[in-house]
Structure formats: C-alpha cells, structure tokens
Image (cartoon, grey):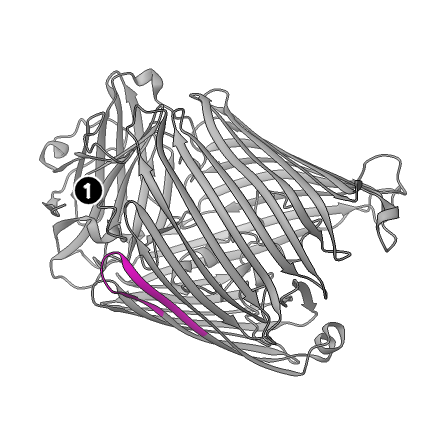
Amino acid sequence: MTKQQFNLVHQSAAIEIDGELTEAAWQQATHIPLIYRNEPVGDLTPPVKTDAYIFEDGESLYVAFIAHDPDPTKIRAALRDRDDLWADDNVALMIDTFNDERTGYEFYVNPFGAQGDMAMSDVNGWAEDASWNAIWDSAAKITTEGYVVEMRIPFSALRFPKGGAQQTWSIAVWRNYPREVLYQMANVGFDLDVACSLCQFDKLVGLSNIPETKNIQIVPSLTALRHDEKPILPSAWQAGEVDKELGVDLRWGFTQDAVINATINPDFSTVEADTIQLDINSNDSLYYDEKRPFFLDGASFFKTNHFNLLYTRNIAAPDYGVKLTGKSDNHSYGILLTDDENTNLIIPSNQGSSLANLDEKSKVAALSYQLDIGEQNNLAIMSTHRETQSYHNTVLSIGGGYWFNPSDSLQYQVSYSDTENSNELQQYFSLDKHQQGAAYKLELSRENRDYHLYGSLENVATDFRADLGYEPEVDYKNITLGGGQTWYGDNQDILTSWEYETEWDKTFAQNGDLLEEEFELIFLVKGQMRSYARLGLTHTDEFYFDDFFKQNSAYIQAGFYPSQNIKLTLFTEYGSEIDYHHARLGDSFTFEPDLTWDVNNHLQIVLSHKFNYLELDGERLFTANVTDLRLYYKFNMQSMLKLILQYENIDKDQQLYQREISEVNKDYGTQLVYSYKLNAQTLFYLGYSDTGYQDDDLKSLQRNQRTFFTKFSYAWQL
C-alpha cells in the first residue's frame, strides 16, 4: 500500500471534551478516513464508515472519531475500568512520535468513554504493553447513527524529538467492530507479507515549535493498613498496628525526549488480588505482573529480545528509586537505581527452580542502551547489578536484530553473569562461592501472509544467573524448528480462517545428556460468533532425576460469544504427566472453563474454575479445584465497587506420597474494594481482605488473616 501523508492542523480553540463535536474547530481539523478493513483478511472494504479528525493547539493533541453503525443497539460496550475495554467496540489513535517505526503509543476509547492505553513496539515482532498509563481526557456518546469519541492527549504525556524543527510522526487510526466476527478498520491497509506493522503506518506532518514546558508530575500517596492474624487456630484475633506509609512519585520530563522518575516508598499494594496460579505439580517459580507506577513508566527501555533480565517484582520493598529514560535520534537509554529491604532470588537449574531470600538490604542498578540502525535493525546493550554485604550478581548482555528483507530477520542475544554467593546460599543450595556463566540465543524467522517459519539455537550455562530478572532455567542447550500455514475464508463463512503449526525442539544439559525432545502439532480455526478453537497434540521425552519419561497429551482451547454480552472460554487437556515430587509418570486431566458476563452497563461478572488431577496406576495422587469469582460494579466512569472471592481445594492421598502431608488442603480469600479514579494516578481505594484455610487438624475452614486498607494519591501536574 502507498503511504498517505496528512498535514496536522494547528489552531487555538476552546474544546470541551464531552463527546459532542459542536465546536467549529472540528470542521477545520485534519480529516483521516478509515478506508481499509484489515480483519477478517480478504476484502479490504470496511463494513461501516468511520472518520477521524485531529488537530493540535501547541499543548495537546485533539482527536475525534465519528463511528457510524447501522444498528447502534448491537454496540458492545459498558462502563469499564481502565484498560478493560479490549473486547468492546472501540476506536484508537496509534502514533509513533519518533517516526523510528519501532515504538509508539496507543490510546483507546469505547462508546461510554472508557480509556485504554498501551506502549507498543515492533522491534522483534509486534508487542503491546497495557501496563503503561498516561494522563489524558476522553468522552464518548452513543447516537442514533453510531457513536462519537473525543480525546485530548497532552504533549506532556508523550515523548518525541526535542527542538523546533517540523516533525514527522507515523500514525494509524483504528476501529474495532465486534459483531458475528471481529472487524478491524484503519486508515492503513496492512500488507501481511511485511513482518513489521509500524513501518506501514501513514505519516503525519506539520507539528513544529512545541513550546517547552515544565512537564513535572508529582504524585504524593498515603497508604494505611491494619493486618490482624490468628497465629494458631482456633484462637482469638491478634490486632496489628495501623501501618501508615507516606510516599511520593516524581516524573520530570526535563526535555521532550527524556524523563527522570524518582520515588520514595513506592506503594506495593496491588489493590486487586493476583489470579491464583495452580502450582501443585510445577517445578518452576511463579511469575506475576508488575503494577507499581514507578517501575511501569519507561519499562520498555529495559526489555531485551530473548532473556528477561529485569523482573522488577523481585524488588519487593524499596525505600527509594531513581530512573532516567530517554531517546535522542537513534539512541535509546535507561538507568535505574534503587534499593530493597528484602533480597529475593530465583535459584535456577534444568530440573526446576527455587526461591531464596537473604535477610539483607540490597542495592540495585540497571543500565540499558539501544542503537537503531537503518530502517529496522538495532543493537542493544543491558547490564544489571545487585549486591548485599555478602552477595552480588552482575549481568552484561548484548543483542539486537538484523532484517534481510521485510519478511526475514535474525534476532540474537548474548549475556554473561558473575555471581558471588553468601555462605547461606552456598550451604542451603549447594552453590559455589563464585559462579560465572554465559547465555546466548539466535533466532531466524520468516513471516508471510500465508505461512511462517522459524528456528532457534539457545545455550545457557550451568552457572548463569540473572538474579534481577526471571530466568528460572539454566544448564541447557536447545534447538527449535517450527512453522505453520494459514488459509483465509470470507467474513460470511462459518470459518473465517484456519491454520496449522508444528514445532520440534530438543534440549540437552551442558554435559551432553538429553533433557527433553518434544514434538507439537497445533490446529487453529476462527469463525462466526467470534469463535476460535485450538487443538494441540504433544509428544515429549523428558529426563527428570535420572530417568526418561515418555509423555503424550492432547489439549483443546476454545472460546466464543453466545450473545452480545457473554463470553465463554474453555481449556482442557488429557495425557501423561510427570509427578515432579516423586519422579514417576502418571495420567493428568485438566478442565478450565471461564465466563465473562456483562449483566448490564454497570455490572460485570467474571467466573473461572480450574479442575486438575493426577493419577498413578489408577489411584488419584491429588485432585485440585480452584474457583475465582470477580464482581465489578461501576457506578460511573470514576467510581467502582469490586468483590473478589477465591477458593482452592486440593485433596491428596497420603498413601501415594513418600513424605507426610496434609490430605485436606483448603484455602480461601476474599477482597472487597471501593475505588474512585480521576485518572491513572489520582485515585482513592478503601478495602478489606481476608484469608483462611483448613488442613487435617481443622474440621472446617477458619479465617486466619484479615486486612483493612486504604490508599490515596493525587497527581499534581506543573
């Protein structure tokens, strides 16, 4: 497709963001029609008309959408919390402010005015990060002809080249239109034989002489909680003291392309309980998403192609933090300095990982740099360091990507670590005092409209450690080959697309012993009612504790919308599985249904269940049931009440375990939270949570912990 160029109109006008385009300025704004349909693939003609309008006033970018709809009663949308509108009707502005065709921002609004924003990157395939949050304004109204959206995005929320010269930005305006199938329209018609998406965006020109501003944001916060517990059950409650924490986050965009973040006592209250992860028969440490604003802003500057070298939830209790991130021409950089009252580590191996905690305060540092080369190539360097009085871990990494043509690329990364273990770590985990090791990965891939191919080589030394990151496996060498093919139907067909994918990989220990060989065949179809179904067949030969285990399994993952406001999904798997506690082979079954129901525009119910068992020679080693119920009631766009109920029940057979265990293992948790959010940083929470359990010594579930908490923060923009 030929790229279009749009001239951005500059005008000074008083605009009220109310979802009504009554101001005369909108008549003079730059008009961008959405003339292409990109999903379903095939006919490029959009099923409905959509027009976008955009202008700037020297301080903000103003964007409006008129989204026509032949039957507005079929619009799928409701009052949503931030970043919870992805399945709705919505429109979006996507902009690459540096015009480097590698990174950018996305701003989404649904027909009720709910917001979603993401940072996007297109360095090693398309990636989106919904944890990025900006402060901006939006409003929307449903009309008899569809709906209208207005946005105001302050330039202070964006990063872009400094200086007064005229700038060129890459731009796409987007509409998601979910009906029997999901239609996606844009001003760009994407060529699927070109692996990158940002490189196909249209161009927006005319922006110049943006005045320098202070661009300072100060967010003081107050968190208070009281934690009560019953150390022994049954017993009386032991009331805890009220723990009050004052904190402050500072964000200073001292130039248009560089930002300093600073924090004191960053709040770690995640406000919403993490989803229960069933780890009864897992030998790897669990992974949870970061939610603290200080660590989220500019997080993409510290991401590398293949290895996760900075997992900030390892930094559990920092007193302070300072971070500098920026981009100048083709240079991107980031520096992070902080501390941690607790030093949490993952001790990796090729047979699983363990968690370690040093009762010492640690100092933490991370450094990143990326050089953009040519149109798509890049070279990146990153280093992390963590130390206490008795321990340190340092990692240095270099990586990047080289594109031979728009479809074929080579991605690579080489890392090296140096570790000094404390006496405690040496004794408990049988580690040497000094460890040094390297890790590398090379991946060659081809991405086309109808097929894709890939292959990779990976080598991680026995003594490689990325203690600030999340790398739970070491001591292995792996080769992977895979590919797949896709066919496309029409949007009226029962199946709108169908594809297959196959992958083979083989993994050895560093001493040459075979660890695993796996072959997987996957079939995927998409169709009406926004349905999808994935069938996977897997054969695995796995080495575990001096023995080989042949495993065969089949799984189905499927989902569809039986009605406009109900989504059903299912994952089920049956096959052989290793009992990792006793190194023996059993038969496993998993069944995980999920329901999302928008009862009305205010109330949403999300219910998920996980059922899993493992049998050994016909006898049940364990049976696990986990239920997670979440009720969200939105009074309006700012105010919400949230109730979370979680229940876990694991029955074990003592006769099949080689150590003494509790046959009854029941846990529950509840959380009730009221929230009021003016924006991503100005908010108020008031909540209560409790937990309880039952084991062989208790006749029923008993509460053993309860917490009362509140939080207030306010974003001052100077």
Which of 264 and 471 lies nearest the eye of the viewer?
A: 471
Q: Amino acid at mark 1?
A: Val
Q: Is residue 684 above or below residue 268?
A: above
User: Can you give x and y, in whole percent of width and height, for residue 414 in the image?
Assistant: 43, 74
Residue underneath mark 1: 188
Judge whether residue 408 is colored magenta: yes
Compare residues 531 and 435 and report the one nearer the observer. Answer: 531
Give the residue drawn at x 34%, y 68%: 400
Q: Is residue 1 left or right of residue 256?
A: left
- Residue at disc 1, secondary structure: loop
Instruction: Confirm whether residue 274 shows in the render.
Output: no
Q: Is residue 213 left or right of residue 10?
A: right
Could you say where residue 716 lies in the image, as x and y percent from the top left?
39, 50
Above or below, 324 relative to 501: below
| Dot 1 crowding, Cα within 10 Å, few <14, some 14–19, many 20+ | many
| The N terminus lies in quadrant | top left
Q: Is residue 446 visible?
A: yes
**In the image, which residues are magenta?**
400-414
Q: Residue at x 56, y 59 (%)?
A: 517
Residue 121, relative to residue 568: is it above or below? Answer: below
Q: What kind of secondary structure does the magenta stretch mostly adopt?
A: strand
- Against 714, residue 209 (above or below) is below
